Amino acid sequence: MTDFEPNDKQQELIDATSGIHVVDAGAGTGKTFTITRRYANLLQQDETEPDDILLITFTNNAAAEMKERVVANCDYSMSALRDAPINTFHGHCHELLLRDGFSAPTHLGVDDRITSSTRLLENEVVEEDRFREFISQFADEHPEHHDFLRVLRENTSLLEVIRELAAKGIFPTSDGWYRNGESYLDGDFEAFEELFETANEPNEGANGPTQSDLRDDLSGFERDRCFLPDAPAESELRDNYPSIDHEWADRAFDEERDALKAFVHDIYFEYIEFALRQNYLNFSFLQMFAFVLLCEDHALRESVQFDHVMVDEFQDTSEIQFKLALLLAGTDNLCVVGDWKQSIYGFQYASVDNIRQFEERLGNYKRELNSDSERVAFPVDDVTGIKLEKNYRSTQSILNFSRHSLGLPATSNEEVDLDIEDDITPLTATTDHDNSNIEAFTSDDECEAILTRVQEIVGNREYAVEGEDGELRPPSHEDIAVLTRTRRFGRELQSHAREYNIPVAYEGGVELFGTEQAILLLAWLRLLEDRHSKRGWAVVLEEAGYTLDEVKTILENESYPSNMLSFRERLASAETVGGIARLVFDRYGFEDAYADALVAVLQGTFDSTTHNRGAIVRFMEQSLEADATHDVDDNPGGDSITVQTIHAAKGLEHPIVILANINQYSFPPSGGGADRIRYEDPVGLRQTKHYADAHGRPHIYDNWRYRILSKCLNRDYDEERRLMYVAITRAESHVLFSAGSSPSPLFENLPLEPETVEPDVEAAGTTRTEQSRLQVSVPVPDIPAGQSPHSLMDDRVFSDVDEGRGIEFGNQVHDFAEQYAEGAVVEPSNKDERHVAEFLDSLDGELRAEENAYLPVTVGEQQVTISGIIDLLHVTAERVDIVDYKTDLGRHAESEYRKQLSVYYHVVRAAFPDSRVTTALFYTADGDRIEIDPLSKDEIVDLIDRDYAEAQPDGEEEPIIR
DNA sequence: ACTACGACGTTTTTT
DNA sequence: ACGTCGTAGT
């Protein structure tokens, strides 16, 4: 884009160096390009320096990118712009507070200060932990609030309320609420009344009016609830037809809430005090204190205001951020850029009306801020709108189609109130071709269906995409992105793809604490702590291959393997969390991005002086519980399909987009919002339950008023439609929509005829799904239920031969060996792989890697099949060599390996009756090839027999060894 | 055609 | 704990 000249509208914005501008910058209209050009143009003007222009971005990455692109467009160097105010709201507020805001808390009547050592608490899990600690103190000190605390299901739900209030600019002070905050808490009856009336409007039936949605929704009013005695009966509430009586609007809204407000006030205010006492701020408080500071300290505000303020992604700003922008603007040179159709961060308190009702809010906020003193000194009635209408990304068909998504009903009977023609600025494509396929498909197995379609698309001219040279070419994997509403589906798809060796790059946060790496680290940390040591041992022993029975015995006798005990000693002497983590990861051979990310997160949250392992264990447990996500840079690179959430894809583009998992309950997601004390516009602060002693019985009663209110506040699916819009407009050339067996209305209402896809995925190359152990499978009817196939080998011997390595490492070496044997161009990445390569190079016969082996034998009366995978067959004219790679450092498992190789021996003997068959182990650590003398078939049968004799008596289920 | 009721299945997004 | 969908009954 940098190479192009701006179009007329873009140029208009670039040249608009003064006055208030609100820019409607739709998807792919070259927004960043235009903003950076405008920024550079401002710098061209005399007397305007980088320090005079505040440029607010949504993310830190965006800020960094902006800087780079500004540098490319003007005479300033990167070093000159390093400290330029190109930042996020949070970042800017942070700097402001550290520089000039130590006393900000005093403006709320908080008797404490921010200091240079006050830290920003970024990790939510850690904050929730602190918050729980705060609540328990609070509960001790405030017996008068106990009834509210009893109503809550989780104490941390109050943290949500605090965040939401803070985002709206509602703050507590020592003696009440800051400025007009309390009026927000009370709600806006007139606005509510309108909602009530809309919901209570009679519907039009075939013969005359039928009951209103509200009356309908209130049927079953008392079902599954228990109200206080002042509640009306359903019959009383609904005795009118077709609408309920208007008096219920007042009766539901008017509620004595002084105690509730006092409770929330005290929690909120004292939590601020608590945080400062503990020397931390959270994201919300950052903005709160910055706002209060700018409001109260007039001299300071004027000294930190800017000549120019630009806000990017304005549709994602919260109300407090809008107000901050006004306070930071010294003049009316205010430019906000965004696209309401891409507002998808409501859960982060973004308020889409900031941009949709820009002028109205601008006026209201100015009035509010100036009510007692002139804080916004510039006129706000002259607002110029600029619409960017040329799209540089998608074809016209995609652009036209994308508009439909904003009008799709998200439930079976939803009516969407949207005038597509009026509300949506049409975009014009600039592509010179339009070969777009826009399709929908369903399948009972959605993951498989998507992979099937991916394979049909790759290399298919029907789905041609634009190449570097502008010519159409068949697509490859990297041209395809699968976008999902939920992270979970994306991860599921990723694991399906892995099974078929389809290259996938999952981009975005992952549940780091649910990974094998984290689980093992947690286990070792636990077994360092006496209190949880058994839970830790169980995980560690199981990972080492002990059966459940064996683990049980070891735990009972506390007879832990000596190598593990000595490892525990080493861990105990480690100084830092990072040190412990590194030792554990080394032991298991984890040298991956997940391990690195874990170390980084742990070191970041627990500074090196923290020796409190209990706290670390708790942190890891809670992070696991909360599915906390962290960015892990784990992408294989190369030609991979991208899988990411729609949120993660915002701002990006992909030649082909598959929008997946448009299913019931997932898109839109159901549930949530179960908080019992909540703030909601326009009804204000409410509680859904009361603790009270009525009917002679103390109980958590349902709040009948809230039940009526909530039926008028029908759920808003606009944001879900916008998500769909964002997803579609990521696509350059083709869009596909996918659903499973129960598609969402969002899918059903698409103006497309869905096709049914029969899953038929071809595995791309073999995958390694088995350890090189044997499985014995027995026909199911012949054994008692609950009796699973089980391993022929004794797993105990594997517990310590892997010292310092692990399954991951073993898999990696095996994978390398397989690829190398098949002639793939792969470079050995460690000593073991070099040994394998040298060994394979020394062979002159035919190489066959990863051959399945099945040996049917008769044990007693039963037909049993023993199966396994032969790592390597080396076939020459007169001989066949069986080779099994072992990554062990020690040698004490050889007797067990002998059983395994014996099975292979008999399989190969049968397949090559005329050749001599040899069996050998190849120890990759030192390159030794050890010949093994195979057991006879009878001896194998005996072993199985004996194993069953052991397994049968107690009937315990044994795990399948995988 | 409309209403009432019960069964059903699910629980997100992240600066 | 919730909202939505399907169905039985008027």
Image: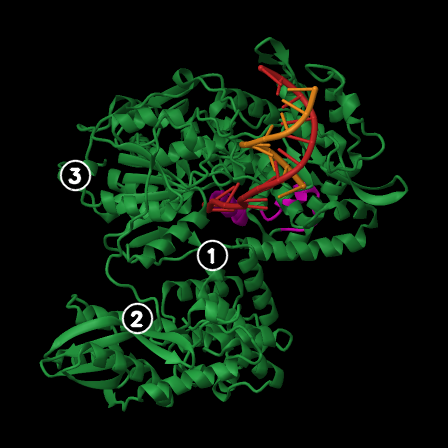
Chain colours: A green, B red, C orange
Quadrant of the image occupied by residue A794: bottom left
Front label number (3 vs 1): 3
User: Element under label 3?
Assistant: helix
Q: Which residues are magenta?
A: A90-113
Where's residue A59, x and y in %?
A: 42, 44
- Residue at far front of view: A861
Say how many tags the image has. Answer: 3
Please state which of residues A593 and A747 is positioned toward the viewer in this rendering: A747
Pointer 2 residue: A812
Q: Are marks 2 and 1 on the same chain?
A: yes
x and y percent of residue A160 in the render?
62, 44
User: What amino acid is at disc 3?
Assistant: Arg
Q: Amino acid at mark 1?
A: Glu
Report the residue at 51% width, 40% height from top.
A665
Please indicate, yes or no, whether residue A626 appears anywhere in the rendered image.
Answer: yes
Name the residue tied to disc 1: A511
For label 2, count other residues whose C-alpha is less than 10 Å away and answer few (under 14), some (14-19) or many (20+).
some
Dot 2 or dot 3: first in sequence order is: 3
Please name the amino acid that badge 2 sits on.
Gln
The vertical placement of A931 against A469, above or below, is: below
Which badge, 2 or 1, is on the more N-terminal residue? 1
The chain ID associated with circle 3 is: A
Would residue A918 be found to the left or right of residue A309 on screen? left
Check disc 1 and report its element: helix, strand or loop: loop
Could you tell me what secondary structure mostly forms the magenta stretch?
Answer: helix
Distance between mark 2 and mark 3 Cα atoms:
36 Å
